[in-house]
């Protein structure tokens, strides 16, 4: 099994290769590059999937945009021969595990995730071993190797329902996101043992700045992703995954929303509800109004073009790890399908 350090090193090398490919880009306007990407996707029977946090122009180019759950569900059922996963590395790994017969490409292998990195597989495995008799529930924001020591995977769209589907007296380990774990504990009354991990983007929203914004926009509703810290979650009118926040923003009668999740979601919110106002909640450590995930923003149009043209970097998962990791992912997909999620 690769250690986190080895994993990083592997990605670094593949990514350097990808970078050198990008330097050989033809001179194309952005519109020409988009047209070329669409042409290549058709020619190669490739599907382009994007998470809501990547840039608006990449989202607009995709065949499918969604949250982490929707991307996994879509990958599991696609007929395409190639999947271009415009998101972070663990999303590509999940698609590769679910589709071993397909080529899964990610535009930048260096686009990792601070939350996944906060849970090295070897340390998590030792934690699990130290607490026998627990059901291990892992957030999808984990490496394949961490999923391999997991009983059931969850996303922010289904974590509550999946935890509730476990026996009431089940002893549960939940990792790696402590904020999401605390939130699910508060909703379900469970007392899950939590891994001490966090997403650096969601952990830095500022209660004070949201309160200030709320004073300026008293009618605005506050939308919060459950990876945020407890005090931020307490300010929310709606807590949910990116897809749930989007759905709420479209359906709700409010005209203004303060959005406490990665600011990429505002693109689709604004497109879906152009008459409404979406205000990004600012981080506490910056003068900038937006809170961006630098890993998601590494997925550029140029890299999407280069990766589809050259069919690399390909996401590969060690076969032994994939054989273990697929079980908790499929268990999540089965439970979600039964619950209509
Ligand atoms: P969802 O896609 O489940 O909303 O999670 C957000 C996230 O942080 C993805 O990396
Ligand atoms: Fe990971 Fe946070 Fe970025 Fe999502 S927003 S990919 S959890 S670092």
Image: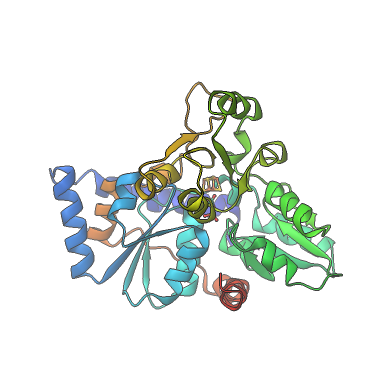
Taking 281 as reference, is 82 above or below it? below
Whether residue 108 sits left or right of residue 151 in the image: it is left
Question: Is residue 77 in sight in this rendering?
Answer: yes
The residue most toward the top is: 287
Name the quadrant containing residue 92.
Answer: bottom left
Quarter holding the N terminus is bottom right
Question: Is residue 201 in sight in this rendering?
Answer: no
Name the quadrant containing residue 39.
Answer: bottom left
* Foreground of the two, 289 or 328: 289
The residue most toward the front is: 253
Taking 239 as reference, is 41 above or below it? below
- Across and down, in percent, residue 180 comes to 68, 51
Q: Residue at x 65, y 44 (%)?
A: 198
Taking 21 as reference, is 164 above or below it? below
- Across and down, in percent, residue 206 comes to 62, 29
Name the quadrant containing residue 56.
Answer: top left
- Across and down, in percent, residue 128 comes to 77, 62
Q: Residue at x 24, y 53 (%)?
A: 305
Whether residue 30 sits left or right of residue 254 in the image: it is left
* Foreground of the two, 301 or 339: 339
Quarter holding the C terminus is bottom right
Number of marks: 0
- Across and down, in percent, residue 335 comes to 62, 75
């Amino acid at each position: 099994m690769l250690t986190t350090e080895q994993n990083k090193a592997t990605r670094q090398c593949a990514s350097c290769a990808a970078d050198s490919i990008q330097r050989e880009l033809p001179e194309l306007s952005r519109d020409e590059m988009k047209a070329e990407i669409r042409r290549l996707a058709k020619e190669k029977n490739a599907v382009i999937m994007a998470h809501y946090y990547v840039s608006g122009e990449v989202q607009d180019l995709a065949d499918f945009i969604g949250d982490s759950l929707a991307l996994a569900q879509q990958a599991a059922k696609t007929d395409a021969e190639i999947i271009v996963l415009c998101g972070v590395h663990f999303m590509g790994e999940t698609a590769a595990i679910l589709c071993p017969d397909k080529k899964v490409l990610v535009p930048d292998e260096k686009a990792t995730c601070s939350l996944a990195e906060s849970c090295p597989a070897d340390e998590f495995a030792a934690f699990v071993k130290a607490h026998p008799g627990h059901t291990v529930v892992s957030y999808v924001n984990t490496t394949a190797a961490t999923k391999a020591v997991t009983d059931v995977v969850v996303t922010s769209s289904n974590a509550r329902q999946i935890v509730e589907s476990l026996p009431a007296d089940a002893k549960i380990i939940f990792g790696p996101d402590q904020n999401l774990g605390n939130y699910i504990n508060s909703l379900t009354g469970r007392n899950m043992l939590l891994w001490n991990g966090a997403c650096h983007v969601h952990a830095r929203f500022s209660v004070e700045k949201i309160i200030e914004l709320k004073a300026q926009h008293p009618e605005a509703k506050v939308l919060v992703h459950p990876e945020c810290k407890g005090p931020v979650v307490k300010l929310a009118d709606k807590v949910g995954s990116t897809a749930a926040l989007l759905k709420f923003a479209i359906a709700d009668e409010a005209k203004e929303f303060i959005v406490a999740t990665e600011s990429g979601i505002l693109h689709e919110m604004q497109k879906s509800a152009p008459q409404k106002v979406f205000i990004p909640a600012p981080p506490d450590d910056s003068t900038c109004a937006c809170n961006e995930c630098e890993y998601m923003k590494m997925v550029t149009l140029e890299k999407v073009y280069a990766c589809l043209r050259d069919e690399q970097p390909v996401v590969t998962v060690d076969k032994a790890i994939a054989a273990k990791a697929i079980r908790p992912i499929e268990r999540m997909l089965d439970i979600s399908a039964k619950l209509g999620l």
